[in-house]
Amino acid sequence: MHRPCASVPPGVRAPVDPVSGTLAVGVPGPDTIVRIADDEGRDVPFGEQGEIVVRGPMVVPGYWRRPEATAAALPDGELRTGDIGFMDEAGWLYVVDRKKDMINASGFKVWPREVEDVLYTHPAVREAAVVGKPDAYRGETVKAYVSLRPGAEVTPDELSAYCAERLAAYKYPREVEILPELPKTTSGKILRRELRG
């Protein structure tokens, strides 16, 4: 039987973080420890983002005949999920993005989902995906791919300026490409990895 590391208790509504607008995924279940860790594995304060680390009965003991993979993903029996999130003081867990999708722009961390959330507030945008693009000066720069709603018109420069008004200078997309359709899985999830190439 599959057991989640966090869930919303029956009869309770999951809160929305007032700063980011992110919906909580739940609170840790029985016999489960969920913590938010920095790159060195140290706990971060409530409200700060880091990697979600889980210990509990749902965590596998290791990878079959792959000790190196086990040591990397499950140090001391804790699962390093690869998901980035934060916890509030009431114990609600929020998932922000995938660690591997983080963009490093001039030493600043940019989470694609944060930029995508801003793009989705533009009335012309139907779909959005944000990726890091190699940049000689900044290391990586933020690039957005969007598809538009039927009949909508907007230029890439207008979308970039729209984001620049709502995001920190290092976060807004310097480049926006408009596509008829974004690549997706059969279940409809947008494939960022296909846009990185």
Image (cartoon, rainbow, N blue to C red):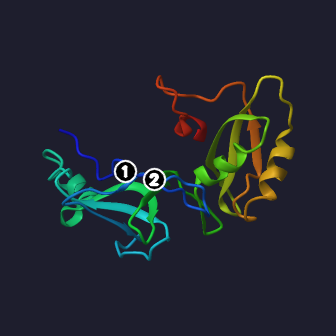
Give the mark, 1 or 2, whose residue is nearer the N terminus: 1
Q: Quadrant for the C terminus, please.
A: top right
The residue carrying pointer 2 sits among few (fewer than 14), some (14 to 19) or many (20 or more) residues within 10 Å by Cα, namely some
Question: Is residue 121 or residue 136 the one in the foreground?
Answer: 121
Q: Is residue 52 left or right of residue 127?
A: left
Q: What residue did someone put label 1 on?
A: 8
For image coordinates 84% across by 52% down, the residue present is: 161
List x then y, in percent, for residue 66.
Answer: 18, 49
For image coordinates 69% across by 38% down, the residue present is: 145
Q: Secondary structure at mark 2?
A: loop
The residue carrying pointer 1 sits among few (fewer than 14), some (14 to 19) or many (20 or more) residues within 10 Å by Cα, namely some
- The amino acid sitting under disc 2 is Ala
Q: Give the image quarter of residue 184.
A: top right
Q: Is residue 189 above or below residue 33?
A: above
For image coordinates 16% across by 51% down, the residue present is: 62
* Contact? badges 1 and 2 (CB < 8 Å): yes
Q: Is residue 116 left or right of residue 52?
A: right
> How far apart are the two marked residues, 1 and 2, measured between alpha carbons?
6 Å
User: What label sits on residue 14 in the rendered view?
Assistant: 2
Q: Secondary structure at mark 1?
A: loop
